[in-house]
Image (cartoon, rainbow, N blue to C red):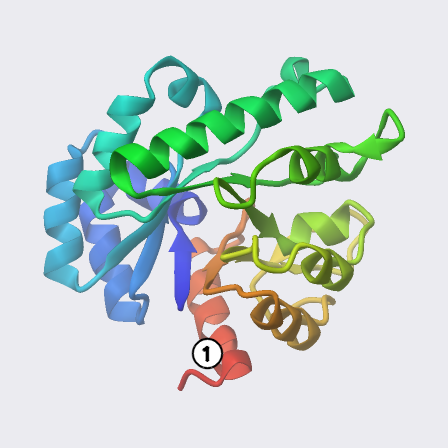
Amino acid sequence: MIALQLYTVRERTASDFIGTLRQLADMGYRAVEFAGYGNNSVADLRAALDQFGLRAISAHVPFQRLEGNPQQAIEELQVLGAQHCVVPGIPQERRATADQVRQLAETFNELGRICREQAGLRFGYHNHAHEFEPLDGSNMWEIIADNTDPSLVDLQLDIFWAAYGGVDPVELMRKHAGRLLQVHVKDMASDEQRSDMPVGEGTLPYDQYLRAASEAGAQVYIVEQDNPRNAMEDVRVSLRNLEQLLGER
């Protein structure tokens, strides 16, 4: 399944969330991942999803929200019909040492247990590039992976950020096969900044990456760009290219 992380079209949803969902459905998307709800109630968003033939497969929920009141966040995801609750990052002051990251892993295990027992939700963690920086003889990604229960905590791999961080996404997916139910996909420009681009329009070998993701058990490919040039056109291009790469036409 192909989905869209709605953060990519945040400027559109800020002014017209419901209308943007309609446009994405008309474009061909059938699933979305939330990153906040704007000024809308989750009930209204669920009604719009149902009306437009969209599914909420996941949502990025700030770690601080889950630490403070996981029940409220879980209830919102249940209304949306989401299946995955994903933490999209951790403040630097909470991940500066290996001991801090191991403590995070313990918290992730507990949040994963709460999500599963209270709502049948999968809990996961989403990476950027800093997870692959050296940290006390390892790195944040590996410490989280080694200290979390695979039955409770998924790894939502962002392929672009892994490559940006200097690791081989294929090797990473092989090593953690079975824990990567969802992967984030965006391509990389050849410019000095290695900017993000629509899938299939940059330098990353996505035919190899998607094959490895499938072999690792990925079920959902989530389009995302942090800095799109033209958000609606970029997500249209990513959808078209992913359909071709995955043979979903």
- Residue closest to the eye, 184 or 180: 180
Q: Is residue 47 positioned above or below 98 on the image?
A: below
Q: Position of residue 98 (x, y in %)?
A: 76, 21
Q: Is residue 139 above or below residue 19?
A: above
Of residue 114 and residue 92, the one placed in the foreground of this image is 114
State the residue at coordinates (27%, 33%).
118
Query: How many badges with numbers are in the image?
Result: 1
Q: Is residue 167 above or below residue 202?
A: above
Query: Residue drawn 15% across and 32% down?
Result: 41
Asked which secondary structure carries label 1, the reply is helix
Q: Is residue 38 visible?
A: no
Residue on which the image places disc 1: 243
Residue 243 place in picture, x, y as percent: 46, 78
**Mark 1: few/some/many CA within 10 Å (<14, 14-19, 20+):** some
Residue type of the residue flagged with mark 1: Glu
Is 58 placed left or right of 246 in the picture?
Answer: left
